[in-house]
Image (spheres, rainbow, N blue to C red):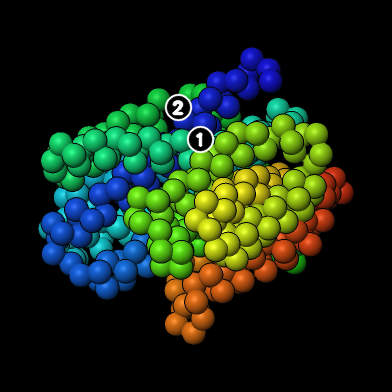
Amino acid sequence: MTDRLRPARTATRAVFALNGFALGMWVVHVPVIEEDTGISHSTLGVLLLVMGVAAFTGMQITGPLADRFGHRVVVPAAAVLISASLAGPGLAGGVWTLGVALALFGLGNGAVDVAMNAHAVEVERAAGRPIMSGFHAMFSVGGAAAAGLGAVLLGLDVPASTSLLAAAAVCVLAALLVRPFLLPGASAPQRAADTAPARRSTAPARLVWLMGALAFALMLAEGVANDWAALHLRDVLGAPAGTAALAFGAFSVTMTVGRFTADAVTARFGPVAVVRLGAAIAALGLATAAASPWTALAIAGWALFGVGLSGCVPQFFTAAGNLDARASGAVLARVVGLGYLGLLAGPAVIGALTTVVPLNVAFVLPIALCVVGAASAAVLRPRPELAARAEEAVRPGSET
């Protein structure tokens, strides 16, 4: 890592942590905001869907903007948007104001998600070695910090409006402070010449959609852990609430630790091997949890599930961003967007399946998706010929 890249790497870590912290502060305060605004669970579900749609929209808008204007402009702007909009849910007084607040927050979340991943791809490309998983680990660290701080603030009966407003102010300041340390992206003449609005990516569409579909599959599996791990131990194995919470805790810890170590493994064995082995381990872990009649073994299965998934999705983001270095934001918007839809869909799909089969049997679907991910890992093999094609496409006189 050169001296020039160290500040950019640190700044990128800070943006990932900021994103995780902002989302974590919102999640911790959901029950309080629901009570303060007087809305029902079903209404909250609709508003969360609005937030998800807004996030997906933000991703599709931000990808091309990052390619056109550069990371030093778009990443801080997206980070400021999610940071400032974090205050909105705490200040909402009813269903309509909360809906607008969550739409803005979702838009900011989608924008910063694509922008920071596009910048991370460029930093990783300049570094010449895998570092993407470490950035995603910082997202988890930010979320954990928010969970701890939020719990303390709630325990002190600090109003949600005060907590979220203060958190928003700190995050806005952080978003502005990282700007000088980010890589600018393409030079101004390059952006004017080769990232005009009509420019099309040279990345094969079928390959982009395949990567997006696999990101969807693996992030759907990840979403299952977020909402169903604790319920699995409680409802299927009869564990008390405190013990049941250890299932998601074990998954979260191993997911975070795994992301911190995945870069070294990727550097040694390559992204194809990481996803092939990781997705297989995830399938084995979830199958163990689903089939286990013992609580301790089920918790171990959820932990193994986190180990397996930890390094998988970052490999797809890196590969997608490198398909066309001059339009990485637009390509990433599709792959990240599809992955995000999988994350949202996971809990709902499992919930629908539980109306016809027991919860542990419903886990057959994410297990199967992990197997598909392992079998399809070869899609991640490096494709230097595509980078050469992208360079050819933007030379003077070339068709764009």
Measured from the top left, where is residue 327 in percent x and y? 66, 49
- Disc 2 to disc 1: CB gap under 8 Å: no
Residue at 61%, 39% (x, y): give it: 258
- Comparing 298 with 123, the one in front is 298
The kind of residue on which mark 2 rests is Val
Measured from the top left, where is residue 253 in percent x and y? 51, 41
* Residue to which mark 1 is pinned: 138
In whole angstroms, how far apart are the C-alphas of marks 2 and 1?
A: 15 Å
Residue at 24%, 35% (x, y): give it: 152
Element type at marker 2?
Answer: helix
Task: Work out whether residue 344 can be spotted.
Answer: no
Measured from the top left, where is residue 115 in percent x and y? 52, 44
Measured from the top left, where is residue 46 in percent x and y? 31, 71
Residue at 46%, 64% (x, y): give it: 237
Please state, as top left, top right, bottom left or bottom right, where the N terminus lies in the image: top right
Query: In the displayed structure, would residue 47 be above or below residue 298?
Result: below
Question: Based on the displayed image, in which of its 4 quarters is residue 221 positioned?
Answer: bottom right
Chain-order first, disc 2 or disc 1? 1
- Comparing 105 with 250, the one in front is 250
Question: Based on the displayed image, in which of its 4 quarters is residue 197 positioned?
Answer: bottom right
Task: Work out whether residue 20 can be spotted.
Answer: yes
Characterize the local packing of mark 2: few (<14), some (14-19) or many (20 or more) Cα atoms within 10 angstroms.
Answer: many
Please, which residue is most extreme toward the top here? 3
Query: In the displayed structure, would residue 386 be above or below residue 177?
Result: below
The kind of residue on which mark 1 rests is Met
Q: Which mark is residue 178?
A: 2
Question: Based on the displayed image, in which of its 4 quarters is residue 118 positioned?
Answer: top right
Query: In the displayed structure, would residue 122 be above or below residue 286?
Result: above
Q: Which mark is residue 392?
A: none
Characterize the local packing of mark 1: few (<14), some (14-19) or many (20 or more) Cα atoms within 10 angstroms.
Answer: many
The mark lying in front, picked from 2 and 1, is 1
